[in-house]
Image: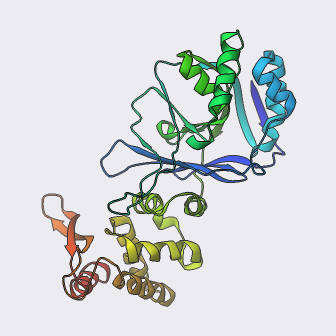
Amino acid sequence: MEIHITHGQGIIKALYDGFATCLIIRRPVAINWPDSRGSMGEYYAVSELSEQEKITFADSLNKALTEGTEAEIMTGIEDFLKLFENGTYQVNLGKIPHDNSNFYMSRSLPADENTNDQKFSGWFYPFDDFNYLYTLESKSIDPERTEYYIDLIRKGGRPKPVIFYSLFHLDPMLSCAFVLDGHHKIEAYIRLKMDIPAVFIVKDNSDYSPVSEIMHGALHLLQDVEFEHLFQNNDDNLPHINFLNDEVLTYALDKILRESERIDVPVIEVLIRHHQSGMPEDRIWLNKRLESLAENVHLSFFNFRKGLNVYFPKYIEDYKADAWFLKTLRNTIELNTWIYETVLR
């Protein structure tokens, strides 16, 4: 069933910049991004919505999803779609196969007791045929509610979760399927090892979202270590951020420059670009960022700390082009040399 939304409230939508996907339910709720440094892994995090912020279905839709006919479900979903952004949606009833599907749930993890390092709240290797991302944290799953649905299913009921699949035609393999409603229903079906009847809402997307919008959402959603990973790996999109007019993301960049153990190539290229522009405002901006870098906690005037990992370009004759190589700067003297040879060259 195809439904066109022309006066949607825009409360629920998915953003995608060609690298990361961010689900919005009034505010950023979940974000997913791949590891572009040679790993097939992906990372995932969700926020915990308060009771006042949760998007709840109308009673009629809740009842339809649990015991209603197909026509009743479709009527309820059509009303629910008014909360979404404008666009064309495909709504279908189908099944999630139990044997080749996986569901990922963000977990609140403490810092490592030995190193005080933060841990990623979610990571996975998407080798299954179908992958679905929960929009609730693990602590929000109520065992009693799951047992309720297990009993209902055993008695012949077939309650249905709602899956929102945002299909990005430019990168269809990186499209995400989010569980909007029915986490406890899914947990019940998984416990019973059954295929899961579900309502699928599919939104066709042909354009990328602004990277700055996703980064602003991610900044408030992710842990520091997660945001740094997303920021430093988003190679193709960092050049599209207007740092001169974005104090929030510039502040986030300063934090990375001061605290990170490694400055990756995308960040280095941002610094180089502001130097090469020749504009006075770009040079002023760059000088302040280099001041932040000089304060990096892993550097010292001598060699008392473990050092800062950076990259430097080197011309490779076989490829007739520069390639980036990793090196460790032990002190501020080495940092100044690297700045002049790499950023200000």
Which residue is depicted at the point 65% across and 26% down? Answer: 185
Q: Is residue 136 visible?
A: no
Residue placed farthest to the left in the image? Answer: 317
Q: Position of residue 78 (x, y in %)?
A: 81, 31
Q: Quadrant of residue 260?
A: bottom left
Please give left or right for residue 97 compared with residue 197 in the image: left
Q: Is residue 111 positioned above or below 312 on the image?
A: above
Front one among 249 and 46: 46
The quarter of the image holding the C terminus is: bottom left
The quarter of the image holding the N terminus is: top right
Front one among 254 and 66: 66
Q: Is residue 94 visible?
A: yes
Front one among 282 and 74: 74
Q: Is residue 40 positioned above or below 332 on the image?
A: above
Q: Is residue 268 positioned above or below 153 on the image?
A: below
Q: Position of residue 189 (x, y in %)?
A: 59, 20
Q: Is residue 232 positioned above or below 294 on the image?
A: above
